Amino acid sequence: QEQLVESGGGLVQPGGSLRLACTAHGFSLAHDAIGWFRQAPGKEREGVSYMGGSDGSIYYEDSVKGRFTISRDRAKNTVYLQMDNLKVEAAAVYYCAATFRGVLVRNAQEFHKWGQGTQVTVSS
């Protein structure tokens, strides 16, 4: 069964850091385009960061630019989202998504596989 499993969420104080992981089971993420999305209570899902499947392209939404870093470890079949200097407004359920595409994808509708989400809480 193909699935994505996120981990690494938790409670952190403002200004703190977390590293989210998204591991693929039953398929290879090696050449998939990746997207990280988040959804806060009462708000629409929004994109956070994206990585092309094989072209090396990376994109960050303005809200996280300079503080979040997306990366991939093909040997571990895992992608990461390093989140530094977290703000209260970053609190949300974070989802990773994948689709077999060499280029970068930003449209959530174009992703075919989604994880179950991991909760990030930013509070003092």
Image (cartoon, rainbow, N blue to C red):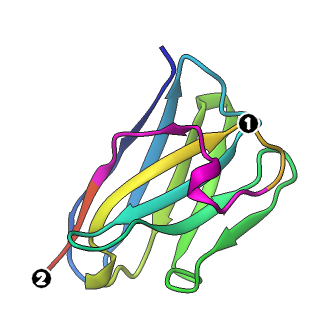
Q: Which residue is mark 1?
A: 100
Q: Secondary structure at mark 2?
A: loop
Q: Amino acid at mark 1?
A: Phe
Q: Nearer the viewer, residue 17 or 112?
A: 112
Q: Residue at x 30, y 50 (%)?
A: 118
Residue 65 percent coordinates (x, y): 58, 82
Residue kind at label 2, given as amino acid type? Ser
Most prominent secondary structure in the magenta stretch? loop
- On the image, the x and y values in percent for residue 53 come to 77, 45
- Which residues fall within the magenta stretch? 104-118
- For image coordinates 54% across by 46% down, the residue present is 97
Residue 51, picture quadrant = bottom right
State left or right for residue 36 relative to residue 33. left
Q: CA distance from mark 1 to mark 2?
A: 39 Å
Q: In this orientation, which residue lies closer to the viewer: 44 or 87?
A: 44
Instruction: Pick out the residue farthest to the left.
Output: 124
Between 57 and 107, the residue placed more toward the observer is: 107
Residue beneath disc 2: 124
The answer to whether the residue labelled 1 contacts the one labelled 2, judged by CB atoms less than 8 Å apart, is no
Q: Residue placed at 63% from the left, 60% from the top?
A: 107
Residue drawn at (47%, 13%) of the image: 1
Q: Point out which mark residue 40 bears.
A: none
Q: Is residue 100 magenta?
A: no
